[in-house]
C-alpha cells in the first residue's frame, strides 16, 4: 500500500529535502508540498493525502491551527507535527488540535518514516522525552485572552495599540498583561512573552 503524504514547511530547502528523503521510501508518495499554513487545507482537499506532515511556525496560519481545520475538513488525513521546536506546550496543543504524531526535526530520518507508518496503523507517535516533559509542565495557566494579548505584545506595541488591535479597553489589556506576567513569574511583559514562548503556550 502506498502512503500519500502532504508536506508543509515554510523553509524551502527543508521542504525540498524532506520531499526528496521521503520519496526514497518505496511505500511513500509525496502528493502535495506547500510553504504556508493557509495553503494546507486546500492542498489536502485536492490531493487527499493519508498523512499531513506540518511544521508549526508558518505564515498564514500556524501548523497547529491548520491541524485543527484538517481534522474537521479532511478527517481521513492523519496529522503529524514535524517541528524544530520540541516544547511541551506545543505537544499538548498539537494533540488537542487532533494531531496523532509529534516528531522533532533532529530525529533520525528512519524515525520519521517509522512514525508515518505507525500513525497509518492507528498508533499515536510522540517523542518519549517530550511526553514526559509535557506531563511535568502541566497545562498552560494562561487564558485565551491573556494569550492573545501576549501575542499582540510581541511587536512591542504600546498598551493603547494592543487595545485598538484587539478591540479592548486599555485597562483590560493592562489587567491581562499583569495576569500573564504573574502567571509566568516574570518581571515584565517581554519576559512573560519569552517564558510563555519557550514553554509552547503561545
Image (tube, rainbow, N blue to C red):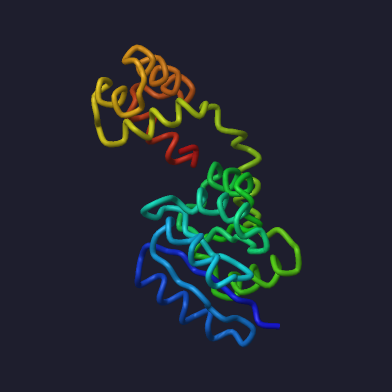
Q: Quadrant of the N terminus?
A: bottom right
**Snapshot quadrant of residue 135:** top right
Location of residue 169 in the rendering, given as x and y in whole percent from the top left corner: 34, 15
Judged left or right of residue 146, residue 5 is right
Location of residue 63 in the rendering, given as x and y in whole percent from the top left corner: 49, 54
The residue positioned 63% from the left and 64% from the top of the image is 77
Location of residue 153 in the rendering, given as x and y in whole percent from the top left corner: 32, 31
As rendered, which of 161 and 199 lies closer to the eye? 161
Q: Quadrant of the C terminus?
A: top left
Picture layout, residue 115 above or below residue 124 = below
As rendered, which of 112 and 144 lies closer to the eye? 144
The residue positioned 61% from the left and 43% from the top of the image is 134
Picture layout, residue 23 above or below residue 195 = below
Judged left or right of residue 149, residue 117 is right
The residue positioned 40% from the left and 55% from the top of the image is 58
Judged left or right of residue 179, residue 160 is left
Q: How many marks?
A: 0
**Snapshot quadrant of residue 81:** bottom right
Q: Residue furthest top?
A: 171
Location of residue 50 in the rendering, given as x and y in whole percent from the top left corner: 64, 70
**Snapshot quadrant of residue 84:** bottom left
Amino acid at each position: 500500500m502506498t502512503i500519500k503524504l502532504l508536506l508543509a514547511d515554510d523553509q524551502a530547502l527543508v521542504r525540498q529535502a524532506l520531499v526528496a528523503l521521503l520519496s526514497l521510501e518505496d511505500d511513500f508518495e509525496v502528493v502535495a508540498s506547500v510553504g504556508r499554513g493557509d495553503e494546507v487545507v486546500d492542498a489536502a482537499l485536492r490531493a487527499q493525502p493519508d498523512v499531513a506532515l506540518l511544521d508549526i511556525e508558518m505564515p498564514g496560519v500556524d501548523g497547529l491551527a491548520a491541524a485543527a481545520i484538517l481534522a474537521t475538513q479532511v478527517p481521513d488525513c492523519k496529522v503529524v507535527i514535524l517541528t524544530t521546536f520540541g516544547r511541551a506546550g506545543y505537544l499538548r496543543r498539537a494533540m488537542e488540535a487532533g494531531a496523532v504524531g509529534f516528531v522533532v526535526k533532529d530525529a533520525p530520518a528512519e524515525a520519521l518514516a517509522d512514525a508515518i507508518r505507525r500513525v497509518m496503523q492507528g498508533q499515536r507517535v510522540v517523542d518519549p522525552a517530550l511526553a514526559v516533559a509535557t506531563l511535568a509542565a502541566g497545562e498552560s495557566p494562561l487564558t485565551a485572552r491573556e494569550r492573545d494579548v501576549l501575542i499582540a505584545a510581541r511587536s512591542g506595541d504600546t498598551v493603547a495599540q494592543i487595545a485598538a488591535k484587539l478591540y479592548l479597553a486599555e485597562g483590560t489589556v493592562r489587567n491581562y498583561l499583569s495576569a500573564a506576567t504573574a502567571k509566568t513569574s516574570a518581571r515584565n511583559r517581554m519576559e512573560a512573552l519569552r517564558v510563555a514562548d519557550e514553554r509552547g503556550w503561545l
